[in-house]
């Protein structure tokens, strides 16, 4: 039987009249990686803080394995402002860093037992600790080890905190939103790093690919209760839906009984004597069950978007630099109607700057951007969340609009719109200062969408949003009848929403890729594999029959015919992807005849194969074009 490193028994936590969780119990076994999932405001961070001793609780018991070492990454880590990066990495008070400090002091004091200190350093594997810290910091794109904490951004501080948590080499690693403020390359590095470590983990993250690939178990905190699933995120989704279906059927049966019992209660007041007392008590139990909320039955919002013309925007050979740092260089792009574009790249390559140029918040050094007259932007930014905390939630949305137009001439009130994004009528009358960070993000998103734009520009919309909210936003964007640009490090989110990518490599290099993020990564892996295969030399006969060496990496350009094929493939793939989505939507609609279903079912696999073939050919030509 596996050893238990953490055992939580009957834990209860309340804040005022709000119950976060009540009498919850779970355990974490040695070597298991556990993901914690819950809605914003349900108490995820509070639970992690309680486990790590940073927050009190009302009742229950927390039992750790003897001599357990815990490493903790908080959601908003803080360091003294006057520390350097390297000093911060020695400030977490682990056994290793404390031993190094003591050894350093012994050197300064000419300690007589220096040999014993050296033995302890050897046993703790502490001699190369600083080197290992620098290796991890470099992987996280932190290279100035003497830089002051006061000079760092919030994202850089988060990365130093990640390095701190990893370098403690704990028995139990607790991570609160580890992927926030990391670019995709760093997320994938951290993913790979944790996969290769045999340690117990408990983490909160909205990154669903990260959950799926790193976590072996899932804990779901819902309705003040905790549910445990022995499997990764994909397994959890399947089992959770089964749980919801069972619960909904119980509630539906209770509703039927409730109606009958309510009729009896009203019709037979004189019969409710001593003998009917049990039935009256049973009625209130049935009423309690019947009034439970049926879960996950949200309708997709079919918002009627403002008309958008054929001209969207045209970026005409724009350039932008900050000193020696080139962001854009003679960049041209003509945005299409109803296009859904994702923007990816390392932090600092210019993704947010590009968006600000498009919105007119910054000016290009040269070139210009022409925006169509019918375009109405809705902009969600990391810096744009500014509320009067003394306002109520509903008033923050009503200040923008009382209602939003829906398809079919219907109108959705501000309150109904907020309910769709998981704000209950009671929560809507709460003051904004009472909201959690994630709930504020969700409210900010509602204020942006409530303006009813026809062109949404979303800069890191997934940070601090829970998975359920992300699913709602994905559904909204998939049915959105307008244009979308998304900057995000959430790979799962990008795969669900975008049609193609702009990849920012830095130094003004930008690539337009016709596909989602997973397809782009497959192409990148294929390209790198080709490069590795072409590193050698191949011997072939020259004109005189003698052997000559030809580098396989020798460059060539696309022929005129190949260039035309390359250009046409992009639009062909887009059209076929659009046809595929239309077929899939039609098959799910339930409105097709048998013959239509048969015809489309035959077309779908053929279309998928054609897309794969054309994408592979596009990759081959793109490899040549990039040389």
Image (tube, helix red, strand yellow):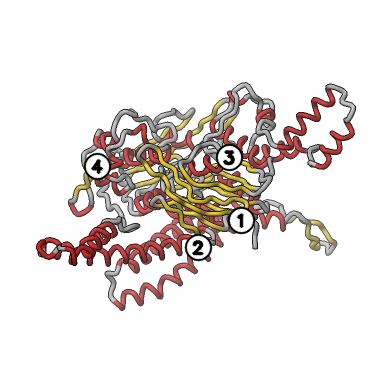
Of marks 3 and 4, which one's residue comes earlier in the chain? 3
How far is mark 2 from mark 1, CA to CA?
Answer: 19 Å
Q: Is residue 438 left or right of residue 564?
A: left
- Residue 208 appears at what percent x and percent y? 50, 53
Write the residue at 83% across / 26% down: 106
Write the residue at 57% across / 44% down: 175
How far is mark 3 from mark 4, CA to CA?
Answer: 37 Å
The nearer-to-camera label among 4 and 1 is 1
Query: Given contact means CB atoms under 8 Å apart, are the residues at marks 3 and 2 in contact?
Result: no
Is 300 located above or below residue 14 in the figure?
below
Report crowding for label 2: few under 14, some 14 to 19, many 20 or more residues within 10 A (C-alpha).
Answer: some
Query: Given contact means CB atoms under 8 Å apart, are the residues at marks 4 and 1 in contact?
Result: no
Q: Which residue is mark 1?
A: 29
Report crowding for label 4: few under 14, some 14 to 19, many 20 or more residues within 10 A (C-alpha).
Answer: many
Write the residue at 55% across / 30% down: 153
The nearer-to-camera label among 3 and 4 is 3
Q: Which residue is mark 3?
A: 73
Query: Given contact means CB atoms under 8 Å apart, are the residues at marks 2 and 4 in contact?
Result: no
Q: Which residue is mark 2?
A: 235
- Secondary structure beneath label 4: helix
Q: Which residue is mark 4?
A: 414
Is 380 located above or below residue 62 in the figure?
above
């Amino acid at each position: 039987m596996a050893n238990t490193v953490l055992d939580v028994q009957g834990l209860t936590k309340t804040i005022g009249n709000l119950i976060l969780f009540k009498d919850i119990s779970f355990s974490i076994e040695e070597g298991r990686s556990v993901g914690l999932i819950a809605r914003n405001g349900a108490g995820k961070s509070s639970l992690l803080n309680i486990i790590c001793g940073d927050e009190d609780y009302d009742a229950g018991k927390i039992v750790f394995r003897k001599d357990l070492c815990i490493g903790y990454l908080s959601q908003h880590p803080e360091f003294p402002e006057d520390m350097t990066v390297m000093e911060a990495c020695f400030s977490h008070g682990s056994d290793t860093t404390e031993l190094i400090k003591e050894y350093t002091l012994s050197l300064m004091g000419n300690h007589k037992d220096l040999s014993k200190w050296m033995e302890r350093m050897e046993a703790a594997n502490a001699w190369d600790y600083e080197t290992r810290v620098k290796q991890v910091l470099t992987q996280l794109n932190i290279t100035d080890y003497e830089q002051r904490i006061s000079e760092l951004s919030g994202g850089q501080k988060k990365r130093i905190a990640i390095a701190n948590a990893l370098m403690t080499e704990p028995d139990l690693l607790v991570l609160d939103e580890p992927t926030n403020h990391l670019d995709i390359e760093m997320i994938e590095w951290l993913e790979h790093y944790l996969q290769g470590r045999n340690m117990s983990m408990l983490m909160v993250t909205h990154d669903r690919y990260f959950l799926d690939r790193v976590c072996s178990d899932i804990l779901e905190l819902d309705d003040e209760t905790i549910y445990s699933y022995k499997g990764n995120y994909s397994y959890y989704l399947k089992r959770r839906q089964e749980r919801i279906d069972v619960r909904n059927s119980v509630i539906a049966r209770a509703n039927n009984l409730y109606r009958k019992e309510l009729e009896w209660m009203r019709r037979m007041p004189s019969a409710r004597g001593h003998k009917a007392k049990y039935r009256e008590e049973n009625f209130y139990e049935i009423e309690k069950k019947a009034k439970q909320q049926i879960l996950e039955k949200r309708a997709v919002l079919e918002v009627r978007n403002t008309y958008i013309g054929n001209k969207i925007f045209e970026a005409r050979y724009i350039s932008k630099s900050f000193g020696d740092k080139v962001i854009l260089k003679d960049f041209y792009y003509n945005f299409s109607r109803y296009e859904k574009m994702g923007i990816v790249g390392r932090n600092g390559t210019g993704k947010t700057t590009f968006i600000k140029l498009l919105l007119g918040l910054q000016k290009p050094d040269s070139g210009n951007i022409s925006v169509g007259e019918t375009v109405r932007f809705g902009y969600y930014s990391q810096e744009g969340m500014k509320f009067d905390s003394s306002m109520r939630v509903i008033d923050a949305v009503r200040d923008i609009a009382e209602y939003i137009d829906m398809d079919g001439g219907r109108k959705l009130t501000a309150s109904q719109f907020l309910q769709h994004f998981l704000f209950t009528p009671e929560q809507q009358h709460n003051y904004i200062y009472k909201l959690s960070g994630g709930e504020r993000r969700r409210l900010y998103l509602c204020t942006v969408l409530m303006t009813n734009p026809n062109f949404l520009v979303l800069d890191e919309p997934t940070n601090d949003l829970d998975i359920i909210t992300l699913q709602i936003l994905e559904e909204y964007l998939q049915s959105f009848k307008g244009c979308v640009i998304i900057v995000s490090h959430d790979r799962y989110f990008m795969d669900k929403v975008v049609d193609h990518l702009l990849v920012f490599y830095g130094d003004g290099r930008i690539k337009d890729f016709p596909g989602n993020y997973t397809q782009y990564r497959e192409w990148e892996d294929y390209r790198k594999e080709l490069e590795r295969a072409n590193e050698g030399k191949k011997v072939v006969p020259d004109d005189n029959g003698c052997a000559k060496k030809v580098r396989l990496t020798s460059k060539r350009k696309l022929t005129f015919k190949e260039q035309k094929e390359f250009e046409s493939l992009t639009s062909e793939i887009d059209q076929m992807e659009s046809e595929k989505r239309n077929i899939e939507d039609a098959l799910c609609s339930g409105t097709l005849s048998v013959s239509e279903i048969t015809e489309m079912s035959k077309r779908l696999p053929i279309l998928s194969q054609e897309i794969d073939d054309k994408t592979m050919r596009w990759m081959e030509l793109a490899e040549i074009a990039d040389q």
